[in-house]
Image (cartoon, grey):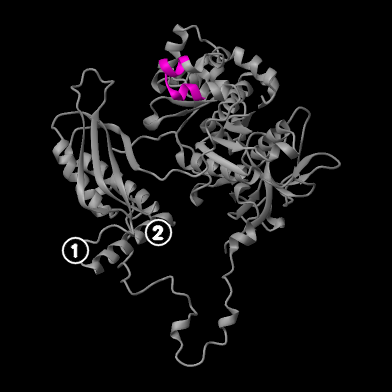
Amino acid sequence: MFALVDCNSFYASCERIFRPDLKTKPVVVLSNNDGCVVALTKEAKNLGIKMCDPWFKIEKTFKQKGGIAFSSNYELYGDISSRIMSILEELAPKVEIYSIDEAFLDLTGIAHCMDLEEFGRACQKQIMQYTGMPVRVGIGPTKTLAKVASYGAKRYPATRGVLDVTESCKRTKLMKLMPVNEIWGVGRRLNKRLLSQRVSTAFDLSQMDTGQIRKQFSIMLVNTIRELRGETCIPLDNAPTPKKQIVVSRTFGKRVTELDFLEEAVSDYAARAGEKLRKEGKACKVISVFIRTNPFRKQDIQHREIRSTSLLYPTNDTRDLIKSAKFLLKDLYRKDFNYNKAGIMLSNFFDETVYQLDLFKKKDRNTQDFKMMSLVDQINQSNLGPVSFLAQGIKKEWSMKRELQSPRYTTNLQDILAVN
Amino acid sequence: MNLKNLGQIADSDRNSETPLFSEYVQVGWPSPADDYIEKSIDLHQLLIKAPAATYLVRANGDSMLNAGINNGAILIVDRSLEPKHSDIVIASIDGAYACKRLQLTPKVGLLSENIKYPPIFLKNGEELDIMGVVTAAINKF
């Protein structure tokens, strides 16, 4: 037995936790640079706002109608997410963190001693009490069916956010009402092909002949069908897969044409990527840098390109990363283009303790460099920071806009909630 | 941005993680204190019982002065506790959180700990929203 715990409009609900005045107000959260809507409450939905609506188009009427908008506050969302995951880890024997706002639970064992719907309500209640986050819980014999149940819990208010579809008559009823594109793993393209074969609901799909599907589609879809019939094919994945690459990329707050600014930006991303790499205890051998112009500005000539280099020895020293990133950027950069995004990707990882020794590098220097980087990390994790390399820039004029950001209530002492 | 010179980075043989007591300093008798080394005192353990449900909040003003909460104190707020009569809580009636003493009987209200501030009672149709129970206050002098 599996459960899927899924937060209701997660980002927007996070913004409400420390703001009781927003409880019944329409709230939206905007993407990087306050571009478009990435999360919205049902009150905002009732105003006709949709996901991905561009902010500049809706700003005026949304504000007139009493709506409140926020820039993404990833520090807050990340902290609330980790609180929720740790609560779930205490409630269930096995947890798979599926995304920032969703987790699968393995309920084997719990089914013997507790009614599962009751368990779902207990999860819901505890998460609400501990964090203020509304969640829904879908329960079923497979992960795909837990997703189906979660869809039902979202769609039908009478469930009050918890639905158990262990009984097959219950899930048949629900699956007959569920469009096939709402099924976990059925994307837009697959949906089109299925519709052309008159498969329009989850129930239709579950009745398909698996042999036929295997021939026409893929083994993945066969697994989905078997899961819809109650047969477990996708096990709980509770060991996080080690990272194979680290990407840091950001859209700029304004159009950038000068090489200097681009250099600052990629150096800054390189420093951030290096920090992540050291946190994983890894060193990388391949560095890639990409830059691109804004594809939505049709009047601009477009340029997008990625370039990679392989290092002689793996490294996780920010200075090496910045040097290589700048070298790659010089190669990529072309004058007179309006760039609006750049990024860096690190790949081909080695364990930082076991990689080959550099014959020409004195060992002393190696350990000293290592110590220096870990000291930089320590300072930046404490309240003393930040320390950064000059290459990262001081004013960072290119950095993204987050003008409507709420305080980092839970991760920064300067930002904690103030009360009278 | 403000830049601050933090001075030189420590050289390699100074290790901040060296414990104050350790075996290799001794030349003669082993230290009689060896057996008694304990872990250092952890304020986290003292102040935070349910980490996933604990939040920090800053108290502004003097309305809770008699409860030992000074202006600027950092409050430890535990959401995992069920609020009881006479607990100090973070709650809101009118849309903004405040720190008050919770009264459940004879009628529901929020009391200050300073005679300057009158109690606030719940009116018909109003909802009391309690964020959590204040379990400690850190006053810095």
Secondary structure that dominates the magenta span? helix
The x, y position of residue A344, in whole percent, is 28, 40
Q: Is residue A117 visible?
A: yes
Q: Residue at x 71, y 31 (%)?
A: A117
Residue occupying the far right of the picture = B106
Q: Position of residue B63 (x, y in %)?
A: 68, 50
Which residue is drawn at the image coordinates 17% and 28% (left, top)?
A: A337
Q: Looking at the rendering, which quadrant does residue A175 occupy?
A: top right
In the image, what residue type sits under mark 1?
Leu
Residue position marked by numbered label 1 in the rendering: A359
- Say which residue appears at 71% left-offset and 56% top-offset: B67
Label 1 packing within 10 angstroms: few (<14), some (14-19), many (20+): few
Q: Where B22 falls versus A216 (above or below)?
A: below
In this rendering, would A208 be left or right of A292? right
Q: Chain of mark 1?
A: A
Q: Amino acid at mark 2?
A: Gln
Bounds of the magenta span? A212-223
Disc 2 is placed on an element classified as helix
